[in-house]
Amino acid sequence: MDENKKQNFKIVIIILIIFLIVLSSLLILRNFESRGASFDINKKDTFFSSNFSSNSIFILGSSQIGPLNATSINQILNDVLIEDYEVYNLAYNGNAPYRDQFGNELIEIQPKLLVYGISYRDFEFYQQNTFNDSFLPDTHEIIEYQLLKIGNDKIPLNPQFQIRSLFRDLTSVDTKLESVNFYQDNTPFFPYKVNPVLKSYDEVQPKINNLTNSTRLLEDTSHPFKRHSEIFLELFLEKMTNNSINVVLISTPLAYISDISDERKNTYDIFLKKLEKKYGVKTFRLDTAYYGLDLWEDKRHVSYHPDVTQYNNDISKIILNEVK
């Protein structure tokens, strides 16, 4: 009996040690995740230590927003407007609504306008209501939703995914040389290539068509938080609205819009209309605006080649209409 007790005690101790190791790892993982794969927290602190005027305009989003040239947009605005405005592009690779890196800083600055770029890649609408065919409430969904309302920095919702992500990040080799990238002062988090790529519309078309039921082949939607990105976006908009900060949403350009299923497009449309009605935000649809045009880096991104000006011009027009 005594031997069994000793054995059970050892098992309990081992379990506790494993639990502490896993908990510590998750805290580290959460810190990695909150910063994003390509986000430099030190640059953030340096950037926001500057003084910003009340006429500041911030553009937010992922690499699909990165190609916007803040300098060009700023020049267009100041050629038309009497007041001086300063435009900043805060895009960074891998950004999505579940990563709110700038909310508190933006509230403190009280900018004139926020331009927020989103796309199909940010959400997993097509997965909703597919895992629970029972008439009973999904308690897992309810608990996750309440945790998300508290904040995504409180608890990791998918430890297994985060553990895999950490090992993948730590073991991957970045073959991109820093010397071929550069940063701009008004776009501090997005690396630009010295020699930007410019491809025709036909060159970037997906090789596989008619992917009505295979959206995963076109979009990286594997991250567990992406299914909840609509919640995070609503929390962000609510926060900005409560602080009297004007936000407009941009549905970013895509070269493969015809390969997204009608069902997913419809759900996306309904969600955008919901945001317009609930938060009084305007949405501008550029996702289909450049169909057939030769201004692409790849199927997801407009090129920031100097010969490509339409993206900058369209965003400038949207901003002008908001600040006049």
Image (cartoon, rainbow, N blue to C red):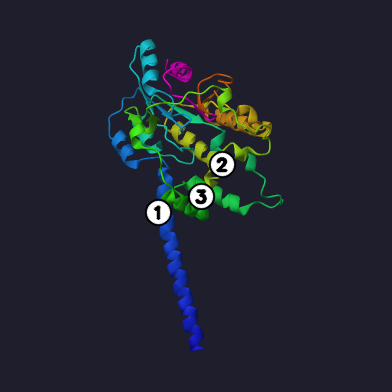
Name the amino acid type tagged 1. Answer: Ile
Figure check: 28 above or below 57: below
- Residue drawn at x 27%, y 31% is 50
- Residue drawn at x 66%, y 44% is 129
Secondary element under disc 1, as helix, strand or loop, is helix
Query: Total label count?
Result: 3
Image quadrant holding the C terminus, namely top left
Distance (Cα) linking label 2 and label 1: 23 Å
Distance (Cα) linking label 3 and label 1: 19 Å
Residue 162 is situated, as x and y percent measured from the top left of the image, at 48, 52
Pointer 3: what residue? 147
Residues at badges 2 and 1 in contact (C-beta under 8 Å)?
no
Residue 181 is situated, as x and y percent measured from the top left of the image, at 36, 32
Name the amino acid type tagged 3. Answer: Leu
Residue 217 is situated, as x and y percent measured from the top left of the image, at 61, 39
Mark 2 packing: few (<14 Cα in 10 Å), some, or many (20+)? some
Sequence-earlier tag: 2 or 3: 3
In reply to whether residue 179 is colored magenta, the answer given is no
Residues at badges 3 and 1 in contact (C-beta under 8 Å)?
no
In reply to whether residue 308 is colored magenta, the answer given is yes
Q: Could you say which quadrant of the image residue 267 lies in?
A: top right
Pointer 2: what residue? 221
| Camera-side residue of 243 and 176 | 176
Secondary element under disc 3, as helix, strand or loop, is helix
Secondary element under disc 2, as helix, strand or loop, is loop
Residues at badges 2 and 3 in contact (C-beta under 8 Å)?
no
- Magenta highlight range: 299-324
Numbered disc in front, either 2 or 3: 2
Mark 1 packing: few (<14 Cα in 10 Å), some, or many (20+)? few
- Residue drawn at x 65%, y 39% is 214
Pointer 1: what residue? 28
